[in-house]
Image (cartoon, helix red, strand yellow):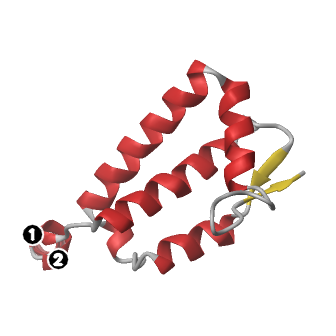
Amino acid sequence: MAARLDKSRTILTTTAVMLMLTGPAWAEDLKLTPNQVRAIGFVNAARIAGSDDRCPRFHLIEAATFSELAAAGITNEMSRSPEFSRVFQATSTASLAKYSANPSEFCATAWKTFGPDGSFKRQMLEQN
């Protein structure tokens, strides 16, 4: 019984390793376009402003952020790629740094940009 269990574990471990090594080929080769990088940055700026009570007068319209990414040609599969993760992390860090430097200014700018009468093409923030 123990030998059979060990053999099953070995097969499962080998299968898991093979799946990791042969994952989607595009994940490593993915190169986001400048438009896609900008979309991730805009979504992150709106996300930072509209979540975790950072800017307490408004909140994120999550569906709008998905629509923005989709409009830039970013699929769910692409959002799991290493390149997307790097850009997402970099733009999150940049937005958080701007927020930390001056929360009031960050929130005012975010509202003017992503609010209902904002300068951005898609509303991603709404009042609470």
* Residue 1 visible in this rendered orientation of the protein: no
Residue 6, given in percent of the width and then of the height, sits at 13, 67
Determine whether 72 is above or below 93 in the image: below
In-front residue for pair 99/1: 99
Q: Nearer the viewer, mark 2 or mark 1?
A: 2
- Residue placed under numbered mark 1 in the picture: 21
Residue 84: name its quadrant.
bottom left
Taking the image as shown, residue 22 lies to the left or right of residue 92, namely left
Residue 44, given in percent of the width and then of the height, sits at 53, 51
Label 2: element kind = helix
Dot 2 or dot 1: first in sequence order is: 1
Residue 62: name its quadrant.
bottom right
Seen at 76% across and 37% down, the residue is: 55
Seen at 54% across and 57% down, the residue is: 43
How far apart marks 2 and 1 lie (CA) works out to 13 Å
Furthest residue toward front: 119
Label 1: element kind = helix
Mark 2: few, some, or many residues within 10 Å (few <14, many ≥20)?
few
Quadrant position of the N terminus in the picture? bottom left
Seen at 80% across and 60% down, the residue is: 117
Determine whether 87 is above or below 7 in the image: above
Residue 115: name its quadrant.
bottom right
Seen at 63% across and 68% down, the residue is: 121
Residue 112, given in percent of the width and then of the height, sits at 73, 48
Residue type at tag 2:
Trp
* Residue 40 visible in this rendered orientation of the protein: yes
- Residue placed under numbered mark 2 in the picture: 26
Taking the image as shown, residue 86 lies to the left or right of residue 65, namely left
